């Protein structure tokens, strides 16, 4: 089975977005080190400006001014649901300052930020940009991340490896009660449980049954 190179996929999407979306004309993709891996706390993306840090850092073997990380969940089938993965790409690119000098745009998250992101996604699609794929969990993917600590010169190392996409995606199991209430759990229920919407106490009439595992 082919390996999908995730950093390459996001890099290519970001590169095309910078060409196609006028609001991103200031971003030089060559100055961005694209990373793709698992991200903490349900985060989907993250951008670090190397000049925005207290001291200048860089990644070994790269003269990038930004590290832009994308969660592998973005391309895992059924993992982000209503969220459009392209919005995360636009969102992270919009964090790049107008000067594209390793600093972050001085704009807070919020409705204005999100509205700009949606406008950029639509412009990208109108210009012929492609949506990101949705991949099955058994697809093998190439991932790339930065080491946690910089060496004495302020350089982080960059590591790559290949793994199954499913290993990077939190497991969710959905249960459904006889009345159609859906309950999402991150692990399998250890004992028979009933639906809390139907009854505050355990009641076998409202037993939860697994709906689907992914
Ligand atoms: Zn952000
Ligand atoms: Zn119920």
Image (tube, rainbow, N blue to C red):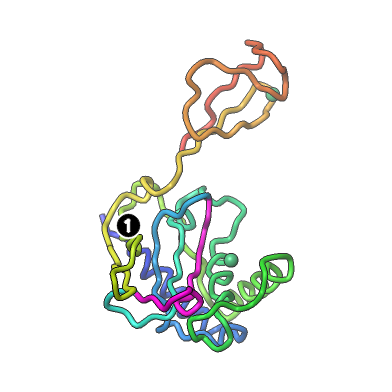
Quadrant of residue 175 in the image?
Answer: top right
Look at the image and tell me in which quarter the N terminus lies.
bottom left
Q: Position of residue 181 (x, y in %)?
A: 67, 29
In this rendered view, identify the residue nearer to me: 62 or 142: 62
Q: Quickly name the residue at label 1.
A: 141
Q: Which residues are magenta?
A: 42-58
Vertical relation: 185 (above or below) 42 = above
- Identify the secondary structure beneath mark 1: strand
Q: Position of residue 89 (x, y in %)?
A: 53, 69
- 72 relative to 87 in the view: left or right: left
Q: Is residue 45 magenta?
A: yes
**Residue at 67 percent of width and 28 percent of height:** 180
**Residue at 41 percent of width and 73 percent of height:** 11
**Residue at 42 percent of width and 83 percent of height:** 31
Q: Quadrant of ligand 2?
A: top right
**Residue at 28 percent of width and 74 percent of height:** 60
Quadrant of residue 127 in the image?
Answer: bottom right
């Amino acid at each position: 089975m082919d390996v999908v190179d995730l950093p390459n996929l996001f890099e290519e999407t970001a590169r095309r977005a910078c060409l196609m979306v006028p609001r991103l004309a200031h971003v030089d993709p060559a100055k961005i080190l694209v990373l793709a891996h698992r991200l903490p706390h349900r985060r989907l993306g993250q951008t670090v400006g190397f000049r925005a840090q207290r001291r200048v850092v860089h990644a070994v073997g790269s003269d990038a001014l930004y590290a832009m990380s994308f969660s592998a969940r973005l391309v895992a089938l059924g993992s982000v649901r209503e969220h459009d993965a392209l919005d995360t790409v636009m969102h992270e690119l919009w964090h790049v300052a107008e000067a594209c000098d390793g600093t972050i745009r001085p704009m807070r998250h919020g409705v204005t930020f999100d509205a700009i992101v949606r406008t950029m996604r639509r412009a990208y699609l109108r210009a012929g940009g492609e949506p990101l794929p949705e991949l099955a969990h058994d697809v093998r993917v190439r991932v790339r991340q930065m080491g946690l600590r910089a060496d004495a010169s302020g350089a982080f190392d960059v590591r790559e490896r290949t793994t199954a996409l499913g290993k990077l995606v939190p497991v969710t199991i959905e249960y459904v009660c006889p009345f159609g209430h859906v309950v999402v759990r991150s692990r399998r229920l250890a004992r028979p449980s009933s639906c809390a919407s139907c009854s505050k106490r355990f009641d076998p009439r409202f037993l939860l049954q697994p709906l689907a595992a992914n």
